[in-house]
Image: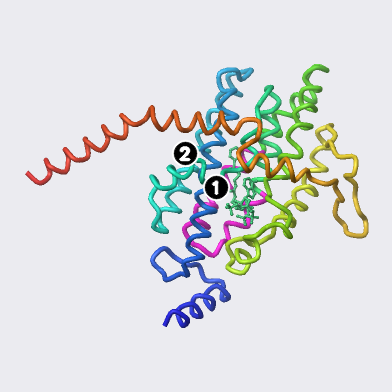
Amino acid sequence: EEQQRNEAFEARIDAGDFIEAKDWMPEHYRKTLVRQISQHAHSEIVGMLPEGNWITRAPTLKRKAILLAKVQDEGGHGLYLYSAAETLGTSRDQMLDALHSGKAKYSSIFNYPTLTWADIGVIGWLVDGAAIMNQVPLCRCSYGPYARAMIRICREESFHQRQGYESLLVMMREGTAAQKAMVQDAVNRWWWPSLMMFGPADKDSPNSEQSMRWGIKRLTNDELRQKFVDATVPQAELLGVTLPDPDLKWNAQREQHDFGAIDWEEFWRVVGGNGPCNTERLGTRVKAWDDGAWVREAALAHARKRATEAQA
Ligand code: FAQ
């Protein structure tokens, strides 16, 4: 019977059907989705921290309002994604517990520091740019609740990307020499970590093959990384910055850019918890959770009281 169910499931995947929360699915499919969606949710919530660092120091009221809205959107994305993961039968407490105990991963990119205001523009341009490249194909993910959450998230991410690029354009076109140098320095620091967001090379990616077969991922890590490089090079030219890779050049034969080797040792070090800001980021999240305990308790007490009143 299990085999029949499996075959029927695979047939639905092959036909391009969306799988819904109450449908039968193999345990491994469920686990893979909980892993990916919860890690994605954690990335959004932890991803609020590097930018949150600059809200009080944004250079103008307009930039501050934009940044506040962006960081709020990220909180919202985390919430839709936790909800999508909950449809698979995992509670939010379980997922947060995994984050707080260091068991669950979140994107390596958020373990780097935001040293200057230009970092905020560069995060919008490169980090949100990479996120969109990775996330647009997830709108066609075979799991319906995840795919639907991704549609709204992608619309908001494209606003995030454009606000970042626009703020850099202003600095590069109207800024002082020092401001232009600040943009270039931020690009130099964020370029390689942005390429690492797409995950290990395909040959070192243990989850890709199965996730591609199940239509959880639609493009591989290397395919997405290449698309991102190709899309970003002309944007860098228009902006007037250089990308810190002497091996980056157009390959007329492949009709794609060649680019230099990624420092995978750095990648695994950061993923393994030993990047520049891992301890600080996790510490901030754990403290926020502990500080919020009274709010959760009060909300539960209020809900209980309302329920008793309704019964009486
Ligand atoms: N960082 O076998 P694969 C955002 C782990 S965007 C940390 O290739 P998979 C928006 C991976 O989990 C960022 N860990 O894995 C924003 C696995 O470990 P596990 C979030 C990484 O799942 C912008 C192991 O390495 N976006 O937040 C990373 O097939 C600005 C082997 O890797 C998403 O999460 C990494 N970079 O492919 C917010 C998108 N890469 O779990 C604020 C959805 C790999 O077996 C400001 N996720 N690992 O212990 C995905 O598309 C996939 O999960 C990949 C990884 C592509 C990230």
**Do the residues under discs 1 and 2 have CB atoms within 8 angstroms?**
no
Q: Quadrant of the C terminus?
A: top left
Q: Mark 2 sits on what residue?
A: 100
Residue drawn 81% across the image and 22% down it:
181
Q: Mark 1 sits on what residue?
A: 40
Give the residue type that dot 1 points to. Answer: His
Measured as percent of width and height from the top left, residue 144 is found at: 49, 62
Q: How is the image coloured?
A: rainbow
Q: Is residue 307 left or right of residue 241?
A: left
Q: Secondary structure at mark 2?
A: helix
Measured as percent of width and height from the top left, residue 200 is found at: 70, 52
- Residue 91 or residue 52, whichever sits in front: 91
Q: Which of the marked residues, 1 or 2, is nearer the chain's N terminus? A: 1
Q: Could you tell me how far apart the alpha carbons at marks 1 and 2 are, in whole angstroms?
A: 15 Å
Q: Secondary structure at mark 1?
A: helix
Measured as percent of width and height from the top left, residue 310 is found at: 12, 44
Asked whether 79 falls inside the magenta stretch, the response is no
